[in-house]
Image (cartoon, helix red, strand yellow):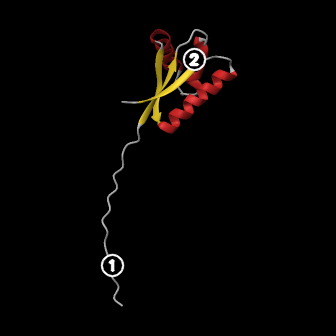
């Protein structure tokens, strides 16, 4: 029996993953120092970046902490929730698709 070889052409199209912003929301109870601590410990911001984002959150009511793939953004938002709960603050983190 003759050996038959076929060449199959396949092309894979890879798409960039959708990216999501992690947002922190201002409230009347969470201290500014705690927000700076969250930004430094969870989002790995330096002190200057963390303070700048904290001021934006305070003045505008919301601020972007970073842009990540869905799974990472979701994890970061959950980490904020857990840390806020442990420290008895109502700090809210949400995620939103980056446009």
Residue appearing at x 49%, y 14% in the figure = 57
The label on residue 73 is none
Question: Front-most of 8 and 36?
Answer: 8
| Label 1 vs label 2, nearer the camera | 1
Using the rendered view, name the quadrant where residue 44 is placed. Answer: top right
Give the residue pinned by disc 2. Answer: 35
Residue 25 image offset from top left, x and y in percent: 52, 17
Under tag 2, what secondary structure?
Answer: helix
- Residue 34 shown left or right of residue 60 in the figure: right
Q: Determine the CA span between mark 1 and mark 2.
A: 63 Å
Disc 1 residue crowd, few under 14, some 14–19, many 20+, Cα 10 Å: few
**Quadrant (top left/top right/bottom left/bottom right) for the N terminus:** bottom left
Residue appearing at x 52%, y 22% in the figure = 46
Residue appearing at x 60%, y 29% in the figure = 79
The label on residue 5 is 1
Under tag 1, what secondary structure?
Answer: loop
Residue 47 image offset from top left, x and y in percent: 54, 19
Q: Earlier in the sequence, mark 1 or mark 2?
A: 1
**Quadrant (top left/top right/bottom left/bottom right) for the C terminus:** top left
Using the rendered view, name the quadrant where residue 76 is placed. Answer: top right
Q: How many marks?
A: 2
Using the rendered view, name the quadrant where residue 19 is placed. Answer: top left
Disc 2 residue crowd, few under 14, some 14–19, many 20+, Cα 10 Å: many
Residue 17 image offset from top left, x and y in percent: 41, 41
Is 31 located above or below residue 42 in the figure? Answer: above
Whether the residues at callouts 1 and 2 have beta carbons within 8 Å, the answer is no
Residue 80 image offset from top left, x and y in percent: 59, 26
Is 66 located above or below residue 7 in the figure? Answer: above
């Amino acid at each position: 029996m003759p050996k038959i070889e076929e060449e199959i052409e396949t092309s894979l199209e890879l798409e960039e993953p959708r990216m999501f912003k992690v947002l922190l929301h201002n409230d009347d109870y969470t201290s500014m120092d705690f927000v700076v601590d969250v930004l430094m410990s969870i989002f790995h911001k330096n002190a200057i970046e963390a303070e700048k984002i904290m001021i934006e959150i305070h003045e505008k009511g919301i601020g972007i902490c970073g842009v990540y793939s869905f799974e990472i953004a979701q994890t970061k938002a959950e980490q904020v929730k857990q840390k806020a709960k442990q420290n008895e603050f109502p700090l809210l983190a949400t995620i939103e698709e980056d446009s």
